Image: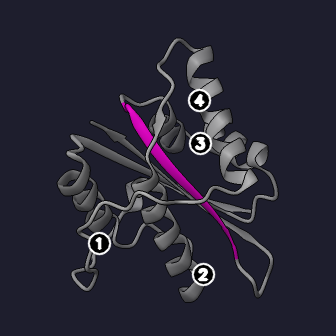
Amino acid sequence: MNACSADNAEASLDSTPTEALIVNYTYNDTEIETMKLINEYRVSIGLNALERINHISFKCEEHNKYMIENNVVDHNDFVARSSNMTSILGAKKVGENVAYNYKTAEAAVRAWLDSPGHKENIVGDYTHFGLSVTTDPATGKKYYTNIFVKI
């Protein structure tokens, strides 16, 4: 199993961010459960629950598709995603967690909470989030991207 931290973010100038607000996103059961677990954890330690924004989840899904197509688990183009959140949503702060090959929402969230860099995002000073969990059709393995923003 593998997860990586936003500390390894790399920017690419080849990415063209979507410059329109995406309002429609259909959540699967794993995505709903993962967001529920993150909010339950935040509330259990006295933090605010995060509000879900479909645009963020759409951008997460784009990154999952990129990772699947390129057979990587990374934060490539995080700067472009962050800039998109700033320009479209007015985000003041953006963080990102990714994970790979966790079969359940519980396992992915547990791994993030056990990793200092990922936990820092989960408990960070954020107000909103989005998440996508995409299954690679070729391997059946799940890719997770979770973006946090403060608006």
Report which residue position mark 1 lands on.
18
| Residues at circles 4 and 3 in contact by the CB criterion of under 8 Å | no
Label 2 vs 4, first from the N-terminus: 4
Q: Is residue 140 magenta?
A: no
Looking at the rendered structure, the kind of residue marked 1 is Thr
Which mark, residue 115?
Answer: 3
Q: CA distance from mark 1 to mark 3?
A: 31 Å
Label 4 vs 3, first from the N-terminus: 4
Q: Position of residue 111 (x, y in %)?
A: 69, 45
Residue range (magenta): 126-135
| Residues at circles 1 and 2 in contact by the CB criterion of under 8 Å | no
Looking at the rendered structure, the kind of residue marked 3 is Ser
Instruction: Judge whether 150 appears above or below 23 on screen.
Output: above
Report which residue position mark 2 lands on.
68
Q: CA distance from mark 2 to mark 4?
A: 27 Å
**Mark 1 residue crowding within 10 angstroms, few (<14) / some (14–19) / many (20+):** some
Q: CA distance from mark 2 to mark 3?
A: 23 Å
Label 1 vs 3, first from the N-terminus: 1
Q: In front of the other: label 4 or label 3?
A: 4
**Mark 3 residue crowding within 10 angstroms, few (<14) / some (14–19) / many (20+):** some
Q: Position of residue 49 (x, y in %)?
A: 51, 25
**Mark 2 residue crowding within 10 angstroms, few (<14) / some (14–19) / many (20+):** some
Which mark, residue 39?
Answer: 4
Q: CA distance from mark 1 to mark 2?
A: 19 Å
Q: CA distance from mark 1 to mark 4?
A: 27 Å
Give the quarter of the image for residue 143: bottom right
**Mark 4 residue crowding within 10 angstroms, few (<14) / some (14–19) / many (20+):** some
Q: Residue visible at 26% across and 86% down?
A: 14
Instruction: Judge whether 128 appears above or below 30 on screen.
Output: above
